[in-house]
């Protein structure tokens, strides 16, 4: 009987193995759960162009914006796991939405197959140059002397920037008010203009204003220094021991249950695409550091680990989903 079951299992695998060997046989749809022109869309279009070459089939970008990326993500989560419907997503919000909304119709880990991290975007803490602090330790002392008087701007609710700010508050005991914006650009404009004294924003976006002297850079939020500014310390190195938020990523995912061979075909195509100097330049312009050797296993660890980390931050901050 056991031999019969094994034979039946092997027989059932034949169609999926065959499909994986010939993949892709038709155009591939890459869903972007944001509007045209944003960071994820910019990356998706650049990657889709290169993947069309490496896969030998057209990769079509399909923008399905709405509900803070939930509409497009749900579409992919419910699709057949055959590799023909993929998701180019940002994390956050992918890995933080359940902490801010009670109505997320999918599990960000269990309902998806991680394929490849395309790149990561280091986040940085800056202050307006008018603030009388030169480093993080001076800032913490300044903030503690003025509880509730300072505010920090970010690209929005549920961003890694907001959660980084909440983690900093919990780790240091300072009291700052979060000011969420609808995107990084308006937040940056107000921090540069002094309307908001503190910003937690994408490193590449703040660097020109740091060089001009309008902003002062206190450190990066991730565990390691950024390739784009290796002289800038992490916040842990600058004085908050153990501080780090997970990498902010842009990555390619598919529905849960994709065949391993199809995942590897896509991963290999992504790695070839990322070797292109043109694509590297476009990713850098969008604020991302290129992932040199994309690995589904590494992506899966980052995704699951970041959800756990953000869950802890949210719990400490007392944030409740709405």
Image (cartoon, grey):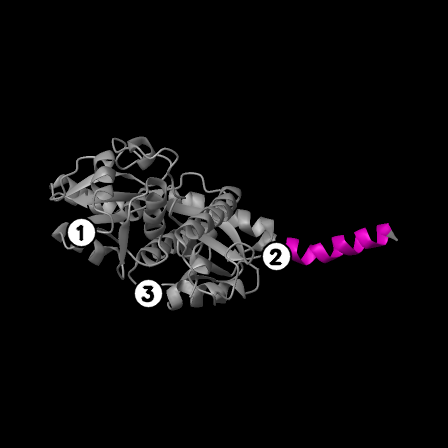
Which of discs 3 and 2 lies nearer the camera? The answer is 3
Q: Which mark is residue 35?
A: 3
* Closer to us: 35 or 106: 106
> Residue 72's image quarter?
bottom left
**Which circle's residue, 1 or 3, is located before the other in the chain?**
3
The residues tagged by marks 3 and 2 sit, at their Cα atoms, a distance apart of: 32 Å
Crowd around label 1: few <14 · some 14–19 · many ≥20 (10 Å): many
**Which circle's residue, 3 or 2, is located before the other in the chain?**
2
Task: Find out whether residue 12 is within the magenta segment.
Answer: yes
Q: Circle 2 is placed at which residue position?
A: 19
- Asked whether residue 78 appears in the rendered view, the answer is yes
The residues tagged by marks 1 and 3 sit, at their Cα atoms, a distance apart of: 25 Å
* Closer to us: 113 or 49: 113
Which of discs 1 and 2 lies nearer the camera? The answer is 1
Marks 1 and 2 close (CB-CB < 8 Å): no
Crowd around label 3: few <14 · some 14–19 · many ≥20 (10 Å): some
Image: magenta residue range = 2-19
Q: Callout 3: helix, strand or loop?
A: loop
Q: Circle 1 is placed at which residue position?
A: 191
* In this view, 144 is above or below 76: above
Q: Position of residue 128 (x, y in %)?
A: 15, 46
Q: Where is residue 311 in the image (x, y as percent from the top left)?
A: 46, 51
Q: Callout 1: helix, strand or loop?
A: helix
Which of discs 1 and 3 lies nearer the camera? The answer is 1
């Amino acid at each position: 009987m056991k031999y019969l079951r094994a034979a039946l299992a092997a027989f059932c695998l034949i169609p999926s193995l065959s499909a994986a060997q010939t993949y892709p046989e038709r155009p591939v749809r890459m869903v972007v759960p944001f509007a045209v022109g944003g960071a994820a869309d910019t990356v998706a279009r650049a990657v889709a162009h290169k993947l069309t070459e490496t896969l030998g089939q057209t990769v079509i970008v399909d923008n399905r914006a709405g509900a803070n990326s939930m509409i497009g993500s749900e579409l992919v989560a419910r699709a057949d796991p055959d590799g023909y419907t993929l998701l180019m997503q940002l994390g956050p919000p992918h890995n933080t939405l359940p902490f801010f909304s009670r109505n997320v119709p999918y599990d960000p880990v269990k309902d998806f197959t991680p394929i490849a991290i395309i790149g990561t975007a280091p986040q940085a803490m800056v202050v307006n140059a008018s603030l009388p602090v030169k480093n993080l330790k001076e800032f913490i002392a300044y903030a503690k002397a003025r509880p509730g008087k300072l505010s920090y701007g970010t690209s929005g609710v549920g961003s890694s920037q907001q959660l980084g700010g909440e983690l900093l508050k919990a780790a240091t005991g300072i009291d700052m008010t979060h000011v969420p914006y609808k995107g990084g650009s308006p937040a940056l404009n107000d921090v540069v203009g002094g309307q908001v004294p503190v910003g937690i924003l994408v490193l590449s976006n703040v660097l020109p204003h740091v060089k001009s002297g309008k902003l002062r850079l206190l450190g990066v939020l991730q565990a390691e220094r950024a390739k784009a500014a290796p002289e800038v310390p992490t916040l842990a190195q600058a004085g908050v021991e153990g501080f780090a938020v997970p990498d902010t990523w842009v990555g390619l995912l598919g529905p849960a249950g994709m065949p391993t061979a199809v995942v590897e075909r896509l991963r290999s195509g992504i790695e070839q695409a990322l070797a292109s100097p043109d694509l590297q330049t476009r990713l850098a312009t969008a604020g991302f550091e290129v992932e040199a050797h994309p690995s589904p296993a590494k992506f899966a660890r980052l995704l699951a680990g970041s959800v756990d980390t953000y869950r802890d931050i949210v719990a400490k901050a007392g944030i409740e989903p709405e």
